[in-house]
Amino acid sequence: MSNKKRILNELKNLNFVISDQYRFSFAPQGIEFILDIENKRFAFCEYKKDKYTIYGSSNFYGLQVLETDTYIEDASNGLNRALVGGALAGGAGAVVGALTKKDKYKYRRIDIRIQTGNASDSYRQFHLISVENPHGAYSFQPLYIKAKAFTNSLQAAIKTHIPAKARTVKASNIVKHESMKSVTDKLRELSKLKDEGVITPSEFTAKKQELLSAF
């Protein structure tokens, strides 16, 4: 049995509702995203590695597509220097550093990032393609066109059918932050009074310790 068949069988045993309409495959990398619309979840399948991961309401915080431009300088001494800049899909890659006449190669890289929200592993990033194109005419590269069509369709489907878990902030943390801000303002005021000679250094230190003892 192939890796793909085994994984699909396992998903069905997990009551994964699979519909051809919501299967997004990218053959060059042997990956597939399968959306289970009924149960608001999706499986990220890596058939070449014989593994898959299911994301849903408990561990899915969003999906991003990142595009990065990489410039490689062909130096006269034989050393290569890479200047890298990145932007989210839809934006132009930012170039770090000044380009010179010696710059010869340009690549565009596309990665998919799944935000998981786990404390020890906040996101999962997968490299989709790297396309060499010295002239920057990516729209004419067949592999780039295919990758963009794949990521655009995938993002639209997930945004429509798979709700991302909202990141929440505890009210207690907000209160603590505001309280700390208030203490900082008071310390700044006390420091000014000390500098102006209104209070002595010892009085400033005593008041500072009193304010900070609350934390």
Image (cartoon, rainbow, N blue to C red):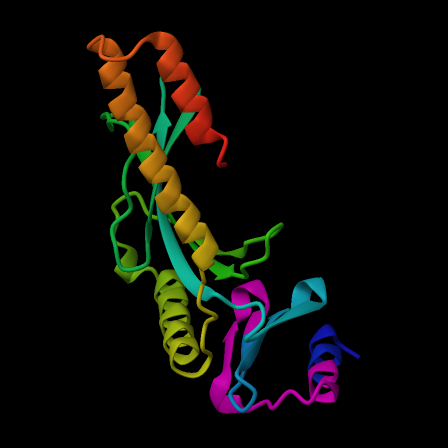
- Compared to 135, does 24 lie above or below? below
Residue 157 point in image, percent of width and height: 41, 80
The spot of residue 215 in percent (x, y) is: 50, 36
**Can you see residue 58?**
yes
Residue 28 is a magenta residue: yes
In this rendering, position of residue 57 left or right of residue 205: right
Write down the quadrant of residue 163 in the picture: bottom left
Q: Nearer the viewer, residue 13 or 215?
A: 215
Left-right relation of 123 to 97: right
Which of the image's four quarters has the N terminus?
A: bottom right
Q: Which residues are magenta?
A: 9-32
Q: Residue at x 39, y 38 (%)?
A: 180
| Residue 155 percent coordinates (x, y) | 39, 72
Examine the rendered structure and indicate whether residue 105 appears above or below residue 153: above
- Residue at horizontal 50%, vertical 60%? 115
Residue 145 lies left or right of residue 168; in this view the side is left
